[in-house]
Amino acid sequence: MTAQATIRVRYFAALREALGAGESLQLAADATVAQARDALIARSPLHAELLARGRAVRTALDQTLCDESAPVGDGAELAFFPPVTGG
């Protein structure tokens, strides 16, 4: 049996408005942020649209900005948010 990790996913800004505050996700224990994003994209057409690879979406793992190669461990918090622009 493959070891599993349960993570908390949080959404911010426009992603939060469309997908809600967050959800939980089960992954293989050695999963990366990219694999978590792929699992979320597969959840629904709305997830697929908002988290699509071509869209600018930033990620943070346990409140630290990260890239998609970062490993996601059990109990981690993964956040998705649009890039911030200033005016």
Image: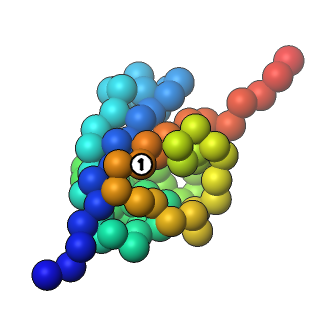
Residue at 34% from the left image edge and 42% from the top image edge:
8
Q: List x then y, in percent, for residue 63.
A: 58, 38
- Between residue 32 and residue 44, name the one nearer to us: 32
Quarter that holds the N terminus? bottom left
Q: List x then y, in percent, for residue 6.
A: 27, 53
Which residue of the protein is positioned furthest toward the top in this rendering? 87
Q: List x then y, in percent, for residue 64.
A: 63, 43
Quarter that holds the C terminus? top right
Residue at 24% from the left image edge and 66% from the top image edge:
4
Which residue of the protein is positioned furthest toward the left in this rendering? 1
Q: Is residue 65 visible?
A: yes
Q: On the picture, is 6 further left or further right than 17? A: left
Which residue of the protein is positioned furthest toward the bottom in this rendering? 1
Q: What is the crowding at mark 1: few (fewer than 14 residues within 10 Å), some, or many (at least 20)?
A: some
- Between residue 33 and residue 44, name the one nearer to us: 33
- In which quarter of the view is residue 22 placed? top left
Q: Is residue 50 visible?
A: no
Image label count: 1
The chosen color scheme is: rainbow
Which residue type carries mark 1? Ala
Residue at 26% from the left image edge and 44% from the top image edge:
24
Residue matched to label 1: 76
Which element carries disc 1, helix, strand or loop? loop
Relative vertical location of residue 29 with respect to residue 7 in this rendering, above or below: below
